[in-house]
Image (cartoon, coloured by chain):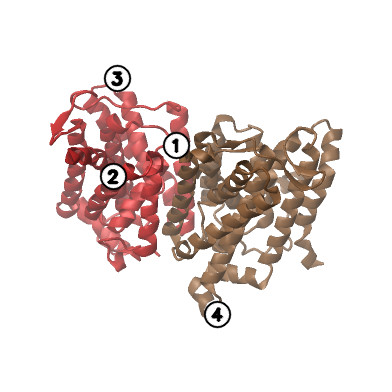
Amino acid sequence: MPHAFLLQYFFPGLIYGSIYAAVAIGFNIIYNATGIINFAQGEFAMLGGMIASTLAGLLPLWLAVAAAVALTAMSGVAVERVFLRRIARGGVLKMIVTTIGLSILIREAALLAWGESVRTLPFFSGNEVSSVSFLGANFSPQVFWVAGATALIVAGLTAFFKFTLTGKAMRGCSADRDGASLCGIDPDRMVAMAFGMSAGIGALAGCVVAPLTQTHYAIGATLAIKGFTVAAFGGLGNSGAAVIAGLALGMLESYSTILIPEAYKDAVAICVLLVVLFAKPTGLFGSRAASLKEF
Amino acid sequence: MAGLKRYLPVLACALCAFLLPPLFAAANAAYLLTQLTMSAYYALASLGLCALMGYAGQISLGQAGFFAIGAYASAFISKSDPSISPWIACACAVLLAALVAALIGTPVLRLKGHYLAMATLGFGIIIEKIARGTKSLGGADGLSGVSPFAILPGLVVTGGKAARAANFSIAWVVLALGLLALVNLVNSRAGRALRALRDGEEAAGAMGIDIAGYKLKVFVIGAVYAAVAGVLLTRYDGSIGPGEASFVKSVRYVAIVAVGGMDNLTGTLVAGIVLNFLSLRGIFGKYDDAVFGLILVAVMLFAPEGRALRRAARAALAARTGRPRSAAGAPQDRGKGAAE
C-alpha cells in the first residue's frame, strides 16, 4: 500500500509546515509594521512551548496555553519597548545585530530557567497512543489541533486587518507612518502591538505542536531560519502565501527523509532558502515593490 | 612616522609572541599560555570578519562555518591518509574554504541587509548540520586524534606542555602576520574602495569601483582567515567538534567585531584576545553565551557608532590620570558607516 506509506509522511509535513507558517506570519507582521526582520522570532515559539509546559503542571491545559501566549506576547512587547524602540532609526545592520543578540539572550535565559532537558505538553485530546486512521495511515488527533490553530490564526488575522479599526490603523501605519500619525494613530503603539501579536502567534504555534515535536531551549534559531525561508518563499509581508509556503516546506522536508538521511533534514530546508534568495528574492507570490521596502 | 603608527599593533603582537612565554614562565603562570594560544586563533578568525563586516559593511553570520570547513577538511585528510604531508592537508583545507567562499559568495553577496544575514546564517547552519550528520566526520563527537602539524622540523603545532611556549609563539606570529596583511589592505586603494562601497554602494559604483569584485574578494579573504584559524587550532587541540560551526559561535565573531569598533582592526584584535581568553578560562561560567548576546545588545544600544572599546579605554585612562584625554590622531568619523 504505497499510498498509505506516502500519506504517513504527510502529517509530519503538515505539523512542521504549520509551525513554520506561524513563525513566518510573525516575521511578516513585524516586517509590515517596521521593516525589521526580527531574528528572535523563533525564540517566541520556544518560549510559548516552554512556559506552557511549566504551567501545565499547575493549571488546566487550556489555561496554561492561554497564559503562555499572553506572557510571550508581553515579552514581545517588552523586547520592542526596551530595546528596539531606542534604535528605531539606526539602520538595518544595527537592527539585525540587536535582534540576534536578543535571540541569544532569550535562549540563554531559557537554558537557565528550564535547563537542557527536552520538554513536552500533554496532548490536547486523547494521549500519545491514541490515533486516527485515514486511508491506511495513522496519525495523532493532535494534528487536528495544529491544523485548526493555523487556520484560526490566518482567519483571525485576516478579519483583524480587514474589519477592525485597530487592524486598519496598523495597516495604515505600515503603508505610511507619517500619514498615519497625522490621522491620529500612534505609530509606536502599533509597532508594540505588532510585536505582541507576532510573539503571541509564535507562542500559540509553539504550544500546539509541543505535544508532537517536543520543545527545547535551543530550537529557536532553526525555527527562525525556517520561518524566514517560508516568509521569503511566500514573499515577505504576505501572510496568506506564507501558509502555502510553510506547508510546502514542511512537506518537502518530510518527504525528503525518504531519500536523504534524517540528519540532513534541516539542511534541505536551508538549501531551499538559499535557492529562493538567489533565484527569486521577491518570493513566489511577492511583488517587486513589497520586497524592496527598506532596502 | 605617522604612517608607521598603524603598524604598532602588529609589532605589539610580534613582541608578545616572544616576550610573553618567558615572562609567564617567570611568573609561574605558563598554564595561561594555552588559552592565549587558542584566543589568538579565534582572534585571527575575527580579524577576517572585521575586514568583511567592519570595512566592507557586509554582515556574515557564517564565519564559524568557514572555520569549521578548514578545521574538518584538514583533520579529515590527515586522518584518512596519515602519509599525506600535513602541509598539503592544511593547504587543501584552506583552499577548499576559499573555493566554497568564492562559489557561495557570488550569489550571496548580491543580497543585502536581512537577506544577506539570513543567507550567511543559513550557510553556517548547513555546515554544522553536515558535520553533525556525517559519520565519517564523527557526527556529534567530531574528529579527535588529529595529527600534529610540523611546520618545520622542531616547530610543531601540537598540544602538550612541552610545546606550549613554542605554540604560543607560532600562534601569535601567525596573528601578527595576519594583522599585518589586513593593516596593509585597509590602508591601500582596495581598502578605500571597500569603505566607499560600505558607505554608499551606488556612489562607489558610479566612481568606477568594481563592487561585486571587491565584495567577493573580501568575502574570500574573511573565509581564508577563518579557515587558517580553524586548521591551526584543530592541530593544536588535536580535535574538532560540530559546535565550532554553530550559530552561537558565528554570533561570537560578530560580537567581537562589534565591540572592537566595527572598522577597527586593533579593537577587534584586543576584543578577540580578551573575550576569548576570559571565555576559555571559564570566567563567564554558565553565562558564557549569554555574555556575548549581552555584549551585542549593549554595544548597539549604548555605543552604536562602534567605538565602545575606545570609549571604555578612554574612560579608564581618564579615571586613572584624573583628566579627560582626547584621542589624538584618531579619526572621529570611524565606524560610523558600518553601524548605519
Residue shown at 80% from the left, 42% from the top: B166
Q: Chain B is drawn in which colour?
A: brown
Q: Dot 1, how many residues are within 10 Å of its Cα: few (below 14), some (14-19), or many (20+)?
A: many
Q: Name the residue under label 4.
A: B207
Q: Which mark is residue A107?
A: 1
Residue shown at 55% from the left, 80% from the top: B208
Query: Which dot, 3 or 4, sits closer to the camera?
Result: 4
Circles 2 and 4 on the same chain: no
The chain carrying label 1 is A
Residue shown at 49% from the left, 55% from the top: A94
Q: Mark 2 points at which residue?
A: A255
Query: Which dot, 2 or 4, sits closer to the camera?
Result: 2
Under circle 3, the secondary element is loop
Horizontally, residue B146 falls left or right of residue B151, namely left
Q: Dot 4, how many residues are within 10 Å of its Cα: few (below 14), some (14-19), or many (20+)?
A: few
Residue B312 in sight: no
Which x, y percent locates residue A102? Answer: 46, 43
Which x, y percent locates residue B96? Answer: 57, 55
Distance CA(mark 2)–CA(mark 1)? 30 Å
Distance CA(mark 3)–CA(mark 4)? 66 Å
The chain carrying label 3 is A
Distance CA(mark 3)–CA(mark 2)? 38 Å
Mark 4 touches mark 1? (CB < 8 Å): no
Observer-nearest residue: B270 or B104? B104
Earlier sequence position, callout 1 versus callout 3? 3
Q: Mark 3 points at which residue?
A: A58
Observer-nearest residue: A210 or A170? A210
